[in-house]
């Protein structure tokens, strides 16, 4: 149900992760994702998983909420893992369901599938943590700051950031509105949940038109309200929140660099125990 | 047999999550044919959830909704059919208008029922007449109507399905006094001329008192009070418990009674005026 | 009461340009003033032009004829528009459509940020504004999870943080339930009394107008009557003609007069009615 969507939600708090500079958080996430895709063995992957787990614990976000964000992508994870299981034919043959067919389950496929699942979980953990611990305003402020160099190319960075703030603010409002309009039209027999595909698509007109009308009305009213509060497009504004890199950011960045370096190094020059991990998946 | 009977229904949102809400908790009531019942409660008391269970949009976690004695959730088909038999008009229904013309919008429900074009046209005319939408407006865009007209056009869209029960969720919200009176007159007309069975969700004790045979008071998903206006407004204590009050006319009469005047209760303006008038005449005689 | 004139409408007319050549006249030659520190209530039915008055006052709209002075400055002076908007704020009907940010305190900060105030100043203004509307405890909450009444408080805080001299409230309770209505109305009265903010309260609920210093009756773009609530409310036929509704006790007194019982005029509250009725009984015995 639409109401169950948690992605992009923010849980206010005072934890270590909450107090990180949003710019640092974004940069850390980018570096983390890149390294995650360089990782080649379980040892390096495990290092990254430990890093994101530590971050989750430090954020004091309830594990239930983290699980909820996971649930949303469970289907995707299972699907990609299945593909890996079916199409990867490296390693020993562990199971051959059809004696005459070419379809086999191999050790490579099993490890590949597990590897993928762990990688996606690690990725989602840290990504959802970013939006869980950073309000949308701060997030857009940070993106605006990070994109400042583009101002030299006459990209209206500030207006884009404002657009993003407003878009994020209105997502829950519009989701609720869609929910209401759909229910109301269903109450008049719109075949949104009962008809065949063609009928459903046709019935969507009865949802989109009112949604569009109300969005324009909202936009017009919001524009007026913003004008009343002295907003002028592109003008300089001061900010309530100060963004300043502090010891936390350097610490988090330092730890990430250390973890990343180890992970990348062991991916290419496996040592000791990592050799075992390396061997089983390739 | 009551036209609608609700037996011990419960409904929760987001069960097994930290945001779990028990929206409706073991509620039972029934409605007789031709009755007008008001549902009163604060925002978040579960009114909207309850309404959506009555026409099969939501399926209760527990309990049954019986329409003419048959469970509407028996099969998917009966649940879908219940949407036409129990007409539900949402809050601010004008925000759901989408047709190119008012006629097309009002005819949306009948069209979904699979009726013939002639029948649809006839129903649109009839529904427009009931809500008092001038027939020359039928070919106009619904977006060109005034606020009050938009509201009535949207309500006509539900009436045109000719449901056995009409449910209106806060039909007067956001309207000025003139618009509100038009809607209330329409409801009175529906009852008088069509013998319609109607449920109204409202915040106003005065509206509930003046229009309904019975009142249901919901609080936090539970049925807090129910009965005739007389019965419900007799239990002032229980209304105050949840931050509701009796109609202002009742308050005035009771205050006068406390000052020693011999006055029974009244809940509506004409009744209160009549009682005071009679008291004056008697007082004049003795 | 302070008698200084804050806003003055001088023979103002306004019409909306519709697509055709017959513009829709909204206001016709109206003149009135808003005094510093007062609580003025503008009463009118939907389409009476009452919302337009608010938008004209802070230069969102400009009059076709006549002029509007805010603290002596003409709203037509483009260079002064920001200054005027700093002085005159508006809170609108739908709280959902005037909240810009996802977090309460960040939304309240939006106005002060636009004014380019230093960070410490924004901080103290935001905190003070949130305390004034009793939302300080919820400053980190997400705006979309608040109730309608709470959202409206955030909108009001957003205005207070700009430290305006006067706030127009354009039907701020129209979308709220009775509980939310009462609490918002109380908050607005407190802002007027304790913070000295001039309030222009626009509504069609007459019971909300009962506690105002002055009431102005607007119908079809004209001012029909201005005066204290009891002066205006006693004009029952005028009010009914405007498509407005008397408060319940006044309606009861009106209904009795139709039945030939004339209580003392000026009944507004339930207590008024009870007193008037007792007096009438005593006199008739």
Image (spheres, rainbow, N blue to C red):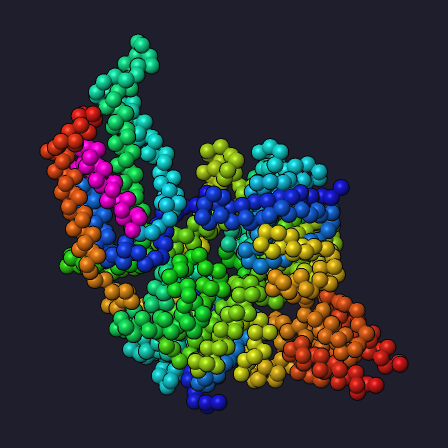
| Magenta stretch, main secondary structure class | helix
Q: Nearer the viewer, residue C199 or B214?
A: B214
Residue B203 position by quadrant: bottom right
Relative to B63, C194 lies left or right: left
Vertical placement of C231 versus A98: above or below?
below
Relative to C237, B151 lies left or right: left
Where is residue A81 drawn, in percent x and y?
Answer: 30, 29
Where is residue A137 drawn, in percent x and y?
Answer: 31, 59
Q: Which residues are magenta?
A: A36-58
Instruction: Answer whether residue B152 is visible to the viewer in this image.
Output: no
Q: Residue furthest front?
A: A272
Q: Residue at x 28, y 25 (%)?
A: A110
Q: Residue at x 13, y 31 (%)?
A: A272
Q: Nearer the viewer, residue A10 or C31?
A: A10
Q: Residue at x 21, y 33 (%)?
A: A42
Residue B210 position by quadrant: bottom right
Q: Residue at x 54, y 43 (%)?
A: A186
Relative to B185, A45 lies left or right: left
Q: Nearer the viewer, residue A187 or C279?
A: C279
Q: Quadrant of the C terminus of chain A?
A: top left
Residue A101 lies in the magenta stretch: no
Q: Nearer the viewer, residue C97 or A52?
A: A52
Where is residue B261 drawn, in percent x and y?
Answer: 79, 77
């Amino acid at each position: 149900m639409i109401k169950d969507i948690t992605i992009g939600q923010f849980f206010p708090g005072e934890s270590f992760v909450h107090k990180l500079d949003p710019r640092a958080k974004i940069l850390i996430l980018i570096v983390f994702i890149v390294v995650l895709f360089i990782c080649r063995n379980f040892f390096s992957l495990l290092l990254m998983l430990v890093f994101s787990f530590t971050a989750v614990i430090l954020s004091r976000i309830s594990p239930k909420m983290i699980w909820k964000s996971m649930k949303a992508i469970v289907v995707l994870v299972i699907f990609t893992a299945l593909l890996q299981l079916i199409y990867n034919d490296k390693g020993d043959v562990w199971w051959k369901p059809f004696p005459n067919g070419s379809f086999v389950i191999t050790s490579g496929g099993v490890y590949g599938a597990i590897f993928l699942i762990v990688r996606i979980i690690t990725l989602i953990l840290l990504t959802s943590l970013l939006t869980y611990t950073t309000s949308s305003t701060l997030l857009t402020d940070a993106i605006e700051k990070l994109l400042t160099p583009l101002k030299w190319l006459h990209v209206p960075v500030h207006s884009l950031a404002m657009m993003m703030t407003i878009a994020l603010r209105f997502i829950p409002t519009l989701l609720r509105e869609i929910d209401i309009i759909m229910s109301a039209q269903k109450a008049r027999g719109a075949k949104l949940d009962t008809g065949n595909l063609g009928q459903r698509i046709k019935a969507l007109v009865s949802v989109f038109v009112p949604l569009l009308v109300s969005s324009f009305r909202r936009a017009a009213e919001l524009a007026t309200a913003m004008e009343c509060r002295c907003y002028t497009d592109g003008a300089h504004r001061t900010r309530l929140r100060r963004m300043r890199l502090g010891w936390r950011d350097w610490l988090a960045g330092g730890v990430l660099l250390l973890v990343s370096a180890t992970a990348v190094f062991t991916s290419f020059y496996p040592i000791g125990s990592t050799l075992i991990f390396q061997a089983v998946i390739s | 047999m009551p036209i609608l009977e609700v037996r011990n229904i419960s409904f929760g949102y987001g069960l097994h999550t930290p945001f779990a809400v028990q929206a409706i908790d073991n509620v039972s009531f029934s409605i007789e044919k031709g009755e007008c019942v008001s549902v009163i409660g604060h925002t978040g008391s579960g009114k909207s959830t309850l309404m959506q269970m009555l026409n099969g949009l939501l399926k209760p976690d527990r309990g049954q909704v019986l329409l003419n004695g048959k469970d509407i959730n028996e099969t998917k088909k009966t649940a879908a059919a219940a949407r036409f038999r129990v007409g539900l008009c949402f809050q601010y229904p004008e925000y759901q208008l989408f047709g190119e013309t008012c006629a097309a919008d009002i005819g949306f429900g009948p069209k979904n029922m699979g009726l013939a074009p002639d029948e649809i046209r006839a129903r649109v005319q009839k529904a427009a007449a009931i809500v008092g939408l001038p027939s020359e407006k039928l070919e106009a865009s619904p977006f060109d109507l005034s606020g009050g007209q938009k509201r009535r056009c949207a309500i006509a869209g539900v009436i045109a399905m000719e449901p056995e029960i009409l449910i209106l969720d806060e039909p007067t919200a956001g309207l000025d006094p003139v618009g509100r009176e038009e809607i209330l007159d329409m409801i009175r007309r529906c009852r008088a001329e069509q013998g319609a069975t109607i449920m109204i969700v409202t915040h106003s004790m005065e509206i509930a008192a003046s229009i309904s045979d019975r009142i249901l008071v919901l609080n936090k998903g539970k049925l807090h009070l129910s009965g005739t206006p007389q019965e419900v407004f007799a239990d002032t204590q229980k209304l105050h418990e949840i931050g509701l009050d009796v109609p202002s006319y009742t308050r005035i009469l009771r205050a006068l009674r406390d000052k020693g005047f011999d006055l029974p209760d009244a809940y509506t303006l004409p009744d209160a005026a009549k009682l005071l008038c009679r008291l004056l005449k008697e007082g004049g005689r003795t | 009461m302070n008698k200084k004139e804050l806003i003055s409408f001088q023979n103002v007319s306004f019409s909306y340009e519709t697509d055709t050549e017959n513009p829709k006249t909204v206001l016709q030659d109206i003149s009135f003033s808003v005094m510093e520190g007062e609580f003025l209530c503008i009463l009118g039915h939907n389409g009476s032009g009452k919302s337009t008055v608010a938008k004209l006052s802070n230069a969102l709209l400009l009059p076709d004829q006549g002029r509007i002075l805010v603290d002596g400055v003409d709203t037509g002076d483009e260079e002064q528009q920001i200054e005027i908007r700093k002085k005159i704020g508006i809170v609108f009907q739908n709280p959902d459509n005037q909240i810009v940010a996802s977090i309460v305190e960040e939304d309240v900060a939006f106005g002060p940020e636009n004014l380019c105030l230093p960070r410490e100043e924004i901080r103290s203004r935001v905190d003070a504004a949130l305390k004034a509307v009793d939302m300080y405890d919820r400053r980190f909450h997400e705006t979309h999870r608040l109730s309608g009444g709470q959202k409206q408080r955030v909108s009001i805080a957003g205005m207070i943080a700009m430290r305006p001299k006067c706030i127009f409230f354009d039907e701020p309770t129209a979308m709220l339930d009775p509980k939310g209505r009462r609490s918002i109305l109380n908050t607005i009265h407190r802002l007027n009394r304790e913070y000295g903010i001039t309030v222009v309260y626009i509504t069609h609920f007459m019971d909300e107008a009962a506690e105002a210093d002055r009431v102005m009756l607007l119908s079809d773009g004209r001012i029909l009557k201005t005066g204290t609530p009891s002066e205006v409310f006693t004009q029952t036929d005028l009010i009914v003609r405007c498509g407005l509704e008397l408060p319940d006790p006044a309606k009861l007194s009106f209904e009795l007069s139709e039945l030939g019982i004339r209580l003392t005029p000026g009944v507004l509250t339930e207590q008024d009615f009870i007193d008037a009725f007792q007096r009438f009984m005593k006199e008739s015995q």
